Amino acid sequence: MAVLSLGVPPVAVFAGVALFLSSDAVLSVETFKMGKAHPLRRLAAFYVWASYFCAQVVLTLAIMTNAL
């Protein structure tokens, strides 16, 4: 997805994809490496949701402004 986003003209598409990738990376670390009592687990969960939401917004705006 990240490689393909480089071929799309708006730079915002790459930024949205980068947010998705970072969200997935943190989610995998949270799920498979962090214990239930890890002190950064709550912060990781917040980051996953925040970055996922921001990625959705950035990609939507990039598509909407490119379509106009």
Image (tube, helix red, strand yellow):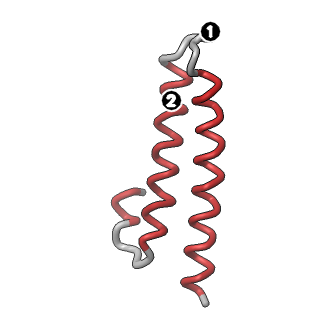
Amino acid, disc 2: Ser
Classify mark 2: helix, strand or loop: helix
Residue 2's mark?
none
Vertical position of residue 46 compared to residue 15: above or below:
above
Please provide percent x and percent y for residue 44: 58, 30
Q: Which quadrant holds residue 66?
A: bottom right
Q: Which residue is mark 1?
A: 37
Please provide percent x and percent y for residue 56: 63, 59
The residue under the point 37% across, 64% down is 4
Vertical position of residue 56 compared to residue 6: above or below:
above
Q: Which quadrant holds residue 42?
A: top right
In the picture provided, is 29 more to the left or to the right than 57? left
- Which sits in the foreground, 5 or 41? 41
The residue under the point 53% across, 42% down is 23
Classify mark 1: helix, strand or loop: loop
Contact between marks 2 and 1 (CB within 8 A): the answer is no
Please provide percent x and percent y for residue 54: 61, 55
The residue under the point 40% across, 65% down is 5
Q: Which residue is mark 2?
A: 28
Quarter of the image for the C terminus: give it: bottom right
